[in-house]
Amino acid sequence: MWQEERKLIYTRNVEQWGIFELTLEGPSLGNPFTDIQLSARFRRGRNEAYAEGFYDGNGKYRIRFMPEEEGQWLFETSSSIAGMDRVKGEFACTSAVNTNNHGPVRVKDSVYFEYADGTRYTPIGTTSYVWHLQDKEVQEQTLRTLRDAPFNKIRMLVFPKSYMFNDREPAIYPFEGSPESGFDDTRIVPAYFAHLEKRVKDLAELGIQAELVLFHPYDEGRWGFDRMPKEADDRYVRYIVSRFAAYSHVWWSLANEYDLMTHKKLDDWSRLFRIVQECDYGGHLRSIHNGQTWYDFGTPWTTHASIQHADVKVVSECTKQYGKPAIIDECGYEGNLDTRWGSLTPEELLCRVWEGTCRGGHVTHGETYWNTEEIIWWSHGGELQGKSMRRIEFLKGIMDEAPAQLAYTSDSYDAATLSVRGEYYLQYFGPHRFAYREFSLPEGTYRVDVIDTWNMVITPVEGEHEGRFRINLPGKLYYALRIQKV
């Protein structure tokens, strides 16, 4: 039974970038999603933030907050219901003790990523759109696969998907109703989002960033979630942000292939981006993914570029044009489907990942191998069958050992090169089978490694090198060179 008197609440400590949660009892009659307003103001000195509350069913309302500053925080609620209005309290934010808790990933120096605590972050992503909506055993299998994989980011849809190999109805829907009777977009089903939240928590335990894709065009008239009215879109986005913004490892992608959603215009995306900005006090990363037409990533509400393009070479120009980090979130998938995008060889996908990386960007992994169970990683999760994943892990190891702020050196060396001038050079040859390479480097002594990116072998070149020098190569595909100052 919810009470009308105001309360003074003292809570337990919350670690930095952890989750403070206030649960209040309120009315369950009527429509809590449209009839009731709830928010809270959080203060520590001059630092002030607002968080909207959300209805979680059974008369329970929650407000969540991610404190970023250590010390004592005060809060006070505001609500259209007297019993939840002007509830006051305080809590202490302590230093982070969880080894996976480095805070949200943020943009650093325009074109890099970094955790809030200063820890280096290089996105090594994969895509598994609706893994969280599969049978329980497939979901658990996906988590086991991720536990043994190099990925530190995964792209996943919030809404169910109707597309190739996605014919089954989900066990539960995000709104009340059914495909036969239609859905009431004013009545959210909290259990649907509670399950999504459970899987988001599982990803946090694995140290994996969860990129939540809020809209997509893969509906095919089954549910209508891609063509809701503006007020329903706005209400849904506010609910998602209020529920998930306290999780430090969440990213926002407004849409997958936004330009294929013909019921929405550019003004709609601008409005939805601004809602996310307004409601997400933690300033999590925000972007949007294209089909054919790139979004304008120069807008202040996008933190980075998220691009679909088969030619990963565009990533360097994109970074230069927008002055933001660029991720090729879809360059094609290693697999054997009867589509151009879903039938890359593992060699080709790995080549694209290396090329995009050595051009100063990031390239997301994907896999689409058909099997009799029709459980395909790109959509359903399960197990990985391809050969690129371990080789991407090999690249990750090389990047982890490299200086943090490598810069793309352009094509001055006739090959994609990352470098810190006079200190470090990583050069990728891809489909070019060079017999040798010649260099003229700043004063200093250098050691050189020849890298076979496919066989994952690093071979040191004998001796040390200065000034102008020549390195002989095996003249084979998919090789790279690493040059480091002694």
Image (cartoon, helix red, strand yellow):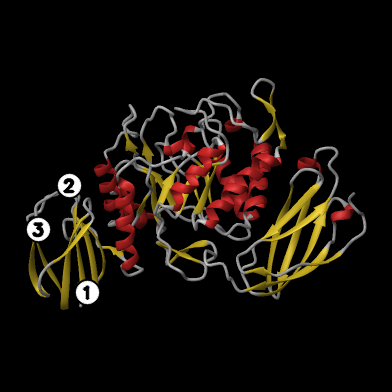
Circle 2: element type: loop
Residue 431, disc: 2
Type of amino acid at the residue the image marks with label 3: Leu
Residue 399, disc: none
Mark 3 highlights which residue? 473
Label 2, label 1: how many angstroms apart (C-alpha)?
27 Å
Q: Spot the residue most to the top.
A: 180
Label 1, label 3: how many angstroms apart (C-alpha)?
22 Å
Upstream in sequence: badge 1 or badge 3: 1
Upstream in sequence: badge 2 or badge 1: 1
What residue is shown at x 69% (from left), y 74% (from top)? 46
The answer to whether 61 is drawn above or below residue 119 in the figure is above
The answer to whether 15 is drawn above or below residue 147 in the figure is below
Left or right side of 55 for 215: left
Mark 2 or 3: in front is: 3
Circle 3: element type: loop
Type of amino acid at the residue the image marks with label 2: Pro
What residue is shown at x 31% (from left), y 41% (from top)? 310
Q: Which one is nearer the viewer's eye here, 409 or 90?
A: 90
The answer to whether 367 is drawn above or below residue 437 in the figure is above
How would you rate the neighbour count of disc 3 (Cα within 10 Å): few for under 14, some for 14-19, many for 20 or more?
Answer: some
What residue is shown at x 36% (from left), y 34% (from top)? 369
Residue 475 shows up from this direction = yes
Residue 199 in the image: x percent, y percent? Answer: 57, 47
Left or right side of 156 for 178: right
Residue 288 shows up from this direction = no
Q: Are marks 2 and 1 in contact (CB under 8 Å)?
A: no
How would you rate the neighbour count of disc 2 (Cα within 10 Å): few for under 14, some for 14-19, many for 20 or more?
Answer: few
Type of amino acid at the residue the image marks with label 1: Gly
Q: Which one is nearer the viewer's eye here, 132 or 329?
A: 132
Mark 1 highlights which residue? 422
